């Protein structure tokens, strides 16, 4: 019930295209869903996050879509750029359990110039 | 500048040796975490601490030990009991209470020879 399933494992997109990464969860107690971006040899950094009381959140070219009934959420990167090439992790947490984040397995995004 | 400092960045160890990875933060965060990252497996929680002199096991604590004698410091020891210690180790911290951004260090890559 703690698992967060992420797909695809890798994604190749042309510059200017839309990158879409999907995550699904089972535990309905999760109430915070962040996305982290990690460049090679670096630690992850928070990209964008959403709470389940909204269905969509947009920050610049990055949008989270959230479907509470389906227990799914996704990251959309509009007008993808080569500088977006990185590994992306979805995650989820809930009240209690010290607010531990449960991470998805990651998606390696490559944006071709 | 505020942040999390991990050292060493690279570490080589012979089988049977214990090694200690350092993690220091000057963000005044109460909560600190250690994650292990392996290719295709996302980030898995080893140990976490929400207060000085207290820490809890995460999902994969076997073969690891930690201490939290100071708010700023949360060192991780990889013991000889850890069967497969070669990995990328990430330290993180955040403010306690409610969901919030997890700040990561740049990681330590441990290789067992």
Image (cartoon, helix red, strand yellow):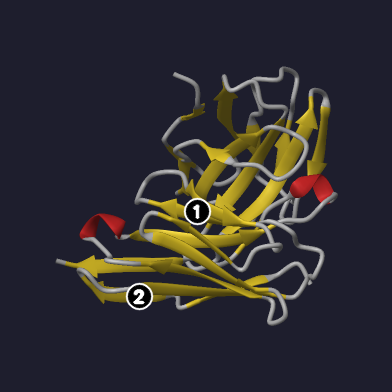
Q: Quadrant of the N terminus of chain A?
A: bottom right
> On residue A11, which mark appears?
2
Please state the chain letter of the residue tagged with numbered disc 1 in the rendered image.
A
- The answer to whether one can see residue B81 in this image is no
Residue A25, position in %: x, y?
69, 73
Q: Could you give the CA–CA distance between mark 2 and mark 1, rounded to whole angstroms?
A: 16 Å
Look at mark 1 in the image and give the residue it sits on.
A36
Residue A18, position in %: x, y?
32, 73
Name the residue at 51% across, 53% down.
A48
> Which callout, 2 or 1, points at the residue further toward the start of the chain?
2
Residue B87, position in %: x, y?
51, 52
Name the residue at 78% across, 37% down.
B97
Q: Quadrant of the C terminus of chain A?
A: bottom left
Name the side, left or right, on which B23 lies relative to A2: left
Q: Nearer the viewer, residue B55 or A90?
A: A90
Cβ atoms under marks 2 and 1 closer than 8 Å: no
Does B50 sit above or below residue B111?
Answer: above
Q: Residue furthest left?
A: A113
- Secondary element at image label 2: strand
Name the residue at 53% across, 39% down.
B104
Classify 10 Å Cα crowding around label 1: few (below 14), some (14-19), many (20 and above).
Answer: many
């Amino acid at each position: 019930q703690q698992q967060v399933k992420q797909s695809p494992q890798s994604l190749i997109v042309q510059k200017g295209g839309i990158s879409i990464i999907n995550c699904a969860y089972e535990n309905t107690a999760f109430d915070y869903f962040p996305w982290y971006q990690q460049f090679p040899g670096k630690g992850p950094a928070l990209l964008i996050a959403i709470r389940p009381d909204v269905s969509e959140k947009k920050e610049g070219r990055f949008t989270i879509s959230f479907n509470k009934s389906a227990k799914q959420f996704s990251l959309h990167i509009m007008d993808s750029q080569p500088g977006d090439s990185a590994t992306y992790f979805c995650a989820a947490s809930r009240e209690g359990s010290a607010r531990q984040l449960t991470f998805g397995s990651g998606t390696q995004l490559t944006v071709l110039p | 500048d505020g942040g999390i400092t991990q050292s060493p960045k690279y570490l080589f160890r012979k089988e049977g040796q214990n090694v200690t990875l350092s993690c220091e933060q000057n963000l005044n965060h109460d909560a600190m975490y250690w994650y292990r990252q392996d290719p295709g497996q996302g980030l898995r929680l080893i140990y976490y601490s929400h207060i000085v002199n207290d820490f809890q096991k995460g999902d994969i604590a076997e073969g690891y030990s930690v201490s939290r004698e100071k708010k700023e410091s949360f060192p991780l020891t990889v013991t000889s009991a850890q069967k497969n210690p070669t990995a990328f180790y990430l330290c993180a911290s955040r403010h306690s209470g409610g969901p919030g951004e997890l700040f990561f260090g740049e990681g330590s890559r441990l290789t067992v020879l």
